[in-house]
Image (cartoon, grey):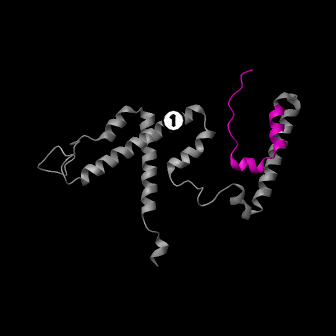
Amino acid sequence: MEKKPTKPMTPFDEVTIPFELTLLKLILPYTSAAKEQTVWILIKLMELKNTIRFFKHPEHIQTTLGLTAQSLPQSPTEILDILTPYLSPEQTQTIEQFQNVMNMMEIVQMFQAETASDTTGSASPDPENPGSNPFGTFNPADLMMNMLSDEQKEMFQMYQDLFSDASDSSEQPSENSAT
């Protein structure tokens, strides 16, 4: 029998699901069909009981799950990296494609910012106008968008809007500090 690659348990599941329940879940498909449904319900009830017990002690939640200010993701890319082990291979491939496109966009933006601030004229095609865009009216982002399928374009646009909203909100000072 071919063994499928296993997905890791989430940190929350590792804390709330004891090893015995995990073993029971693994053995359950080999039991009689008549008892299987009842045992599945019992397992889920035991998981719920452990979850309720876990949340009765909120002071331990961050330390138990290993959450500290240093361990929290600082960017959407870091969040995607954390989620990747829990995704299917197809979902992982989609995320990797998205990250590659985002990396290309960052490079293009850095290049455009560098050429816009270049006052020496060395990278400029127009010696009369040192700050002119070497791409002219060509936009590399448009070229990349033309390479994507309609579904990828929609997802790219959604993530681009999400990231721009996140960066806009992080750049604005908080309203509470204004008082």
Describe residue 179's horizontal placement relative to residue 90 as left or right.
left
Whole-percent x and y of residue 170? 46, 61
Q: Which residues are magenta?
A: 1-28
Describe residue 124's horizontal placement relative to residue 154 as left or right.
left
Residue 37 inside the magenta-drawn segment: no
Up-down relation of residue 173 to residue 88 (above or below):
below
Label 1 element class: helix
Q: Which residue type does callout 1 highlight? A: Thr
Describe residue 67's horizontal placement relative to residue 166 as left or right.
right
Q: Residue under circle 1? A: 94
Q: Residue at x 46, y 39 (%)?
A: 98
Residue 25 inside the magenta-drawn segment: yes
Q: In the image shown, does 66 or 91 lie closer to the viewer?
A: 66
Whole-percent x and y of residue 164? 42, 53
Whole-percent x and y of residue 128? 11, 49
Whole-percent x and y of residue 33? 85, 28
